[in-house]
Image: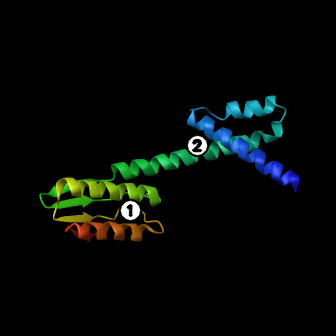
């Protein structure tokens, strides 16, 4: 039992170090080399895997952030705001996109918002988040249309 706890602690420590190195822009070589130098070459594969996981997690997070920030929100005509979420935004990304829509509505005061959902890959809870957005817009006297 104690060996499993030690194993979990080692995995956690390697994961934390991998995250730190990814944040610093370093590749897995430094992490693997330090384990080999410490006499733990058997942990090299785990270290490389944890570094890969940290990199892919960062890339996915950045991709969702970019989608939330760059999904189209624009005035179609003097009365209509078009809002088109794109891709898989997940919870935080969709919330950020909805905040952008609300900010535009507050600044421009359109009569209606058209939510264009063809390019959106909804996740569990997306309909609820879009429902909250629609309710918020309606409470400000803005009509909402989904396409």
Q: Position of residue 77 (x, y in %)?
A: 13, 58
Q: In this view, does 46 lie to the left or right of 110?
A: right
Q: In which quarter of the image is the N terminus?
A: bottom right
Q: Most extreme residue toward the top, as rendered? A: 37
Q: In which quadrant of the rendered view does residue 37 lie?
A: top right
Which mark sits nearer the N-terminus, 2 or 1? 2
Residue at the (47%, 65%) spot, across then down = 123
Q: Most extreme residue toward the front, as rendered? A: 139
Q: Most extreme residue toward the left, as rendered? A: 78
Q: Position of residue 47 (x, y in %)?
A: 72, 41
Q: Are marks 2 and 1 in contact (CB under 8 Å)?
A: no
**Mark 2: few/some/many CA within 10 Å (<14, 14-19, 20+):** many
Residue at the (40%, 58%) spot, across then down = 95
Q: Name the residue under label 2.
A: 55
Q: In which quadrant of the rendered view does residue 100 lie?
A: bottom left
Badge 2 element: helix
Q: In this view, does 27 lie to the left or right of 86?
A: right
Report, in whole angstroms, how far the alpha carbon at label 2 lies from the one at label 1: 25 Å
Image position of 33 with respect to 9: above or below: above
Q: Name the residue under label 1.
A: 120
Residue at the (40%, 59%) spot, across then down = 94
Q: Where is residue 61 in the image (x, y as percent from the top left)?
A: 50, 49
| Mark sitting on residue 50 | none
Q: In which quarter of the image is the C terminus?
A: bottom left
**Mark 1: few/some/many CA within 10 Å (<14, 14-19, 20+):** some
Q: Is residue 40 left or right of residue 13?
A: right
């Amino acid at each position: 039992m104690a060996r499993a706890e030690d194993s979990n602690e080692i995995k956690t420590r390697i994961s934390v170090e991998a995250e730190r190195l990814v944040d610093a822009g370093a590749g897995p070589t430094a992490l693997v080399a330090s384990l080999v130098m410490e006499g733990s070459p058997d942990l090299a594969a785990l270290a490389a895997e944890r570094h890969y996981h940290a990199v892919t997690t960062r890339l996915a997070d950045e991709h969702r952030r970019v989608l939330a920030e760059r999904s189209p929100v624009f005035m179609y005509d003097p009365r209509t705001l078009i809002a088109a979420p794109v891709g898989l935004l997940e919870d935080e990304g969709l919330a950020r996109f909805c905040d952008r829509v609300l900010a535009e509505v507050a600044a421009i005061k359109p009569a209606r918002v058209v939510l264009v959902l063809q390019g959106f890959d909804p996740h569990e809870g997306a309909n609820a988040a879009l429902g909250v957005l629609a309710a918020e817009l309606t409470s400000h006297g803005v009509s909402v249309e989904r396409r």
